[in-house]
Amino acid sequence: MKKIFFIIAACMALNSQAQITKATIQASGLTCAMCSKAVYTALSAVPFVEKVKANIEESTYDLTFKPGSNVDFDVLGKAVVNAGFSVSMLKVNTHFHATKLQNDVHITLDNQPFHFINVTPQTVDGERTVTLVDKNFVSVKDYKKYGKLTSMKCYESGVMDGKRIYHVTM
């Protein structure tokens, strides 16, 4: 009986390991170094962000997350908006464990539901980058483009069964 309990506990520990490791966010509307500094400061203040590395020329910020923390992409977006700018791209590195992907399917990674759009059927293993294509993370043009690739209502609302769902592509 103790062996069974130990095996179950070990499996639960493996499933609870953070899969989302880092991200790159691009801000739009920046015109000077002070703008870049404002976004840098706002992202650095997010509780689950461990490190921020800015690329002023491309207006991008590489983020590393604190181990074991719950990453909330909406909080990252709000940090940029509260600094006075908007998000034009958010790419997230996540670790897959032999995950079967299909177009227009929901998958939970790191306790967060993702809706995969415009992906070919494949089994993904190891670290990969996904791009968020929700309204607040892409241009209006790209948002409309991805909206045509799904019939699910969650794309418009960002919510399914009362939970926030993020829409991504690879």
Image: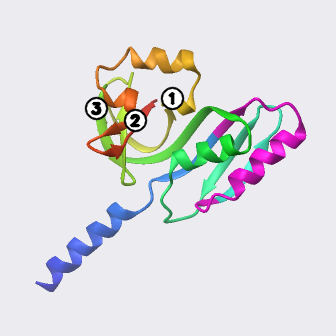
Q: Provide the residue designation for mark 1.
A: 135
Q: Which residues are magenta?
A: 25-49
The amino acid pointed to by label 2 is Gly
Marks 3 and 2 close (CB-CB < 8 Å): no
Q: Nearer the viewer, residue 130 or 2?
A: 130
Q: Provide the residue designation for mark 2.
A: 158
Measured from the top left, where is residue 90 in percent x and y?
58, 36
Q: Nearer the viewer, residue 70 or 34?
A: 34
Marks 3 and 1 close (CB-CB < 8 Å): no
Q: Quadrant of residue 61 in the image?
A: top right
Relative to 89, say whether 62 is above or below. Answer: below
Measured from the top left, where is residue 66 in percent x and y?
58, 63
Checking the image for residue 105, the label placed there is: 3
Answer with left or right where residue 112 lies relative to residue 130.
Answer: left
Q: Which residue: 80% across, 47% down?
A: 38
Q: Nearer the viewer, residue 38 or 5?
A: 38
Q: Quadrant of residue 46 in the image?
A: bottom right
**Mark pair 3, 2: CA separation:** 14 Å
Marks 1 and 2 close (CB-CB < 8 Å): yes
Measured from the top left, where is residue 103 in percent x and y?
31, 25
Task: Say which label, 3 or 1, has the lower sequence index.
Answer: 3
